[in-house]
Amino acid sequence: MARVKKIRTRVAIVVAVAVLALFGSLQDVDDQLTDHWLALLLTPWLLIVTGPVVLAVLIRCAPADRRRAMRSALRTPLRQLAWFISTLLLVPALVVAVSVADPSQLGGTVGAGLSIACVAAELWAVFLFLFASGAVVQTGFGTAAVHPAAPALLTCILVWELAAVGGLPAGPPVIAYMLLIGGPSTVTAITWWEIHRLRSRYTVTLRSGPNPLRPETAPAMSWRAAVSQPRQ
């Protein structure tokens, strides 16, 4: 399964580069890079909005004797959400702290050193947030603890949401629409395959909830597939 996802991601990159080379301009290349970063920043918030709905449906469809355990497992995604929000708040907190302290007023070597240290701390906080964004998208905020199929379902929903907000890629209209729909369609097919494997190998279905005897069967979430959708 992991190999299939890697192949799919590589093919998407090759196709995107080929379309840009044949039909795109420098502006299209710049738009492609911008869309990728915007998708990386937007995806965690789409997860925060979509995740509770998906988890609520999965818990509601599960047998009554498993719902309590699934609700208890919500502590894992809630804990990861709290860490993510903390990394987000750290950036403006450092900016405000530096503005209030204003180490440049000290002057001399000490003031310059403190100013450089503050800038380095702010950059570190920004990169920490970007890393946290990729991490929470890859794990789906740890939703596999609630249901093994949750990360795959969230990936499938996210790629369609990103395709809806991302707009058409470069190229003739026919090719652009094929790329716009083709990317999410392949992710949907892989998601269906993952869920089928969970059912056939581990007797885990969407309605039955997680198999209490095989809790390690959750498929990994493909964040690269999710963030590559807007302009494939």
Image (cartoon, helix red, strand yellow):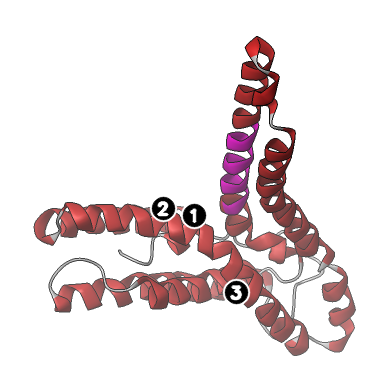
Q: Quadrant of residue 57?
A: bottom right
Tell me: residue 10, above or below residue 189.
above
The image shows residue 225 at horizontal and vertical percentages of 44, 61
What secondary structure is found at the residue carrying circle 3? helix
> Is any atom of residue 222 visible in this view?
no
Spot the residue most to the top: 109
Residue at position x 60%, y 31% in the image: 119
* Image side of residue 218 versus residue 179, left or right: right
Q: Which residue is mark 1?
A: 2
Q: Nearer the viewer, mark 3 or mark 1?
A: 1
What secondary structure is found at the residue carrying circle 2? helix
Amino acid carrying label 1: it is: Ala
Q: Nearer the viewer, mark 2 or mark 3?
A: 2
- Mark 2 or mark 3, earlier in chain: 2
| Magenta-tinted stretch | 121-133
The image shows residue 60 at horizontal and vertical percentages of 76, 88
- Mark 3 or mark 1, earlier in chain: 1
Residue at position x 63%, y 62% in the image: 140
Q: Which residue is mark 2?
A: 6
**Distance between the alpha carbons at the discs numbered 2 and 1:** 6 Å
Q: Which residue is mark 3?
A: 200
Q: Are marks 2 and 1 in contact (CB under 8 Å)?
A: yes
